[in-house]
Amino acid sequence: MECEFATINSNKDEIKEIFENTKTIAIIGCSPDSSKASNKVAVYLKNVGFKIVPVYPKEDEILGEKVYRSLGDIPFKVDMVDIFRKPEVIDKVVDEAIKRGDVDTIWTQLGLVNNDAAKKAKKAGMKVVQNNCTKIEHAAIY
């Protein structure tokens, strides 16, 4: 499958503003495997002070945090949804975020783009960052 080019994306100033206004990050596809990018990013985000919420189909705890099976199962406000899943799953994640009504930002990791889902998220009032790594972008700013 060919990777889409991100036609909807936040600029560097908007990304800085997103980090300044984010406290809680749901990490969709947060692996318990410390060699995986999702785990490394979660460790970094937790260490710099964000509340991370792992969303993964198995495990009860990852990095000392309770694991939820879906975004919809999280019983408290989520500021950002950081997605480590294939582009074809992003649409479903965005639908869950819209249904929640409390998500401010949809963020897809490096190599992940779904412009249709991004359009939906923007229309619902969310900020969108595609094809960027939260760890790399945060470290570059701070």
Image (tube, rainbow, N blue to C red):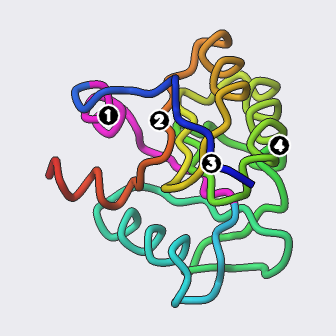
x and y, in percent, of residue 40 in the image? 45, 77
| Mark 4 or mark 3: whose residue is earlier in sequence | 3
Q: What residue do we see at 77% from left, 41% from top?
A: 93
- Rendered residue at 63%/26% (across/down): 118
Q: Where is residue 11 shown, x and y percent of the image?
A: 30, 27
Q: CA distance from mark 3 to mark 1?
A: 22 Å
Closer to the camera: disc 4 or disc 3?
3
Residue hosting label 1: 15
Query: Of the residues under marks 4 and 2, which one precedes in the sequence?
Result: 4
Q: Which badge, 4 or 1, is on the more N-terminal residue?
A: 1
Element class at badge 3: loop
Residue, disc 3:
3
Mark in front: 4 vs 1? 1
Labelled pair 1, 2 in contact (Cβ < 8 Å): yes
> Badges 4 and 1: C-beta atoms under 8 Å apart?
no
Q: Is residue 16 above or below residue 140?
A: above
Looking at the rendering, which quadrant does residue 97 occupy? top right
The residue positioned 62% from the left and 48% from the top of the image is: 3
Q: Which residue is disc 4 drawn over?
A: 72
Type of amino acid under label 3: Cys
Disc 4 element: helix
Residue receiving disc 2: 129
Q: Nearer the viewer, mark 3 or mark 1?
A: 3
Q: Is residue 9 left or right of residue 60?
A: left
Neighbor class of circle 3 (other Cα within 10 Å; few <14, some 14-19, many 20+) is few
The amino acid type, in three-letter code, at marker 4 is Gly
- For disc 1, the neighbor class at 10 Å (few under 14, some 14 to 19, many from 20) is many
